[in-house]
Image (cartoon, rainbow, N blue to C red):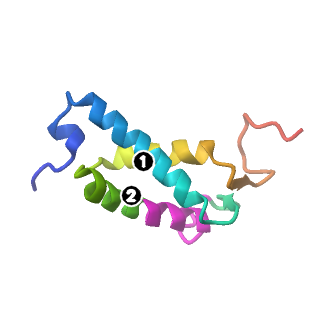
Amino acid sequence: MAIRYDLWLYPDNIARHRAVEADLIRYFMERFADYPHIRLFGADPYDYDAPFNRLHDVLMARAGEYCEREWRYVPTPEQLNRAFFLAVGRSNKFVRDPSDGDPHRSDS
């Protein structure tokens, strides 16, 4: 199996990696705008049929295809995942359950 990830093939091309990663965040933010508010997790964060988990899977595949088509760049799974969750953190489209188990969150 050949190595395909641009980050691994060209590790010194930092400017290109950062540009693609920034575009991935923008890409995810634009895709989130297509959806109504999305409830994060819920009772079972490992429920793979939950809307958030299905959205994650679909958008990861589409983002990989987008990078290859628009940038001629193959992102690593880690780059895709990091960009996705950075976009989730910046988006106002996600709603958290009041008792999601986050000890750092104040419900006041």
Which callout, 1 or 2, points at the residue further toward the start of the chain? 1
Q: Residue furthest left?
A: 2
Q: Is residue 44 left or right of residue 21?
A: right
Q: Amino acid at mark 2?
A: Ala
Contact, CB < 8 Å: mark 1 with mark 2? yes
Q: Residue shown at 35%/34% (left/top)? A: 18
Residue that label 1 marks: 24
Secondary structure predominantly adopted by residues drawn in magenta: helix
Q: Is residue 55 left or right of residue 108?
A: left
Q: Residue shown at 42%/48% (left/top)? A: 24
Q: Which residues are magenta?
A: 45-59
Q: Is residue 35 left or right of residue 11?
A: right
x and y percent of residue 11 in the render? Answer: 20, 31
Residue that label 2 marks: 63
x and y percent of residue 73 in the render? Answer: 24, 49
Q: Residues within 10 Å of mark 1 (few under 14, many from 20)?
A: many
Q: Is residue 49 magenta?
A: yes
Foreground: 40 or 65?
Answer: 65
The quarter of the rendered structure image containing the C terminus is: top right
Residue 15: image quadrant is top left
Foreground: 94 or 14?
Answer: 14
Q: Residue shown at 52%/68% (left/top)? A: 54
